[in-house]
Image (cartoon, grey):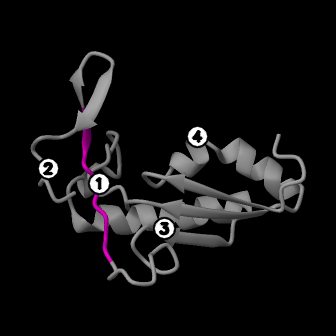
Amino acid sequence: MLSGAHRVAFLHAHPDDETLATGALIAELRTRSVEVAVVTATRGEQGEVVAGPLSRLAGSPELSRWRERELAAALAQLGVSTHAFLGDPPALAQTAAPHRYLDSGMVWVEPGLAGPDPAVASGA
């Protein structure tokens, strides 16, 4: 897969998607010395927090900071040194103003269909 590739970019919506969805591929590419860059669209501000010691972070500004640290650690384990959040340089068009994209807080809108949480502001 991707034989002959020298550079590969991955774009994911939330922190941990890079590990859960493409972590094995990223790790394999890095073992072949392929340069990997990851762009993450949001900081997972509205993401699910499972019951346990991190439950206190749900809905707080500290959650996105925690997820940023988790993401940095995961990328380091995968061997990725090039990362940006969408809307921050270099993942930003030169003529655009910096913009922080927010997590929409996905919910099940019907069985088998996920969509944005209607309780989250439409500006997400």
User: In this orientation, which residue lies closer to the viewer: 29 or 5?
Assistant: 5
User: In this orientation, which residue lies closer to the viewer: 21 or 76?
Assistant: 21
| Upstream in sequence: badge 4 or badge 3 | 4
**Residue 2 coordinates in the image, percent (x, y):** 81, 46
Is the magenta region chiefly helix, strand or loop? loop
Quadrant, the C terminus: bottom left
The residue located at (51%, 50%) in the rendering is: 16
Residue position marked by numbered label 2 in the rendering:
120
Q: Which residues are magenta?
A: 99-107
Task: For the residues labelled 1 and 2, say whether their Cβ atoms are less than 8 Å apart.
Answer: yes
Task: Establish if 105 lies above or below 101.
Answer: above
**Residue 25 coordinates in the image, percent (x, y):** 73, 44
User: In this orientation, which residue lies closer to the viewer: 121 or 7?
Assistant: 7
The residue located at (37%, 60%) in the rendering is: 42
Left or right: where 75 falls relative to 101 = right
Q: CA distance from mark 1 to mark 2?
A: 9 Å
**Which disc number belongs to residue 103?**
1
Mark 4 vs mark 3: in front: 4
Q: Tag 3: residue type?
A: Arg
Q: For the residue carrying disc 3, how many other residues have a C-alpha within 10 Å: few (<14), some (14-19), or many (20+)?
A: few
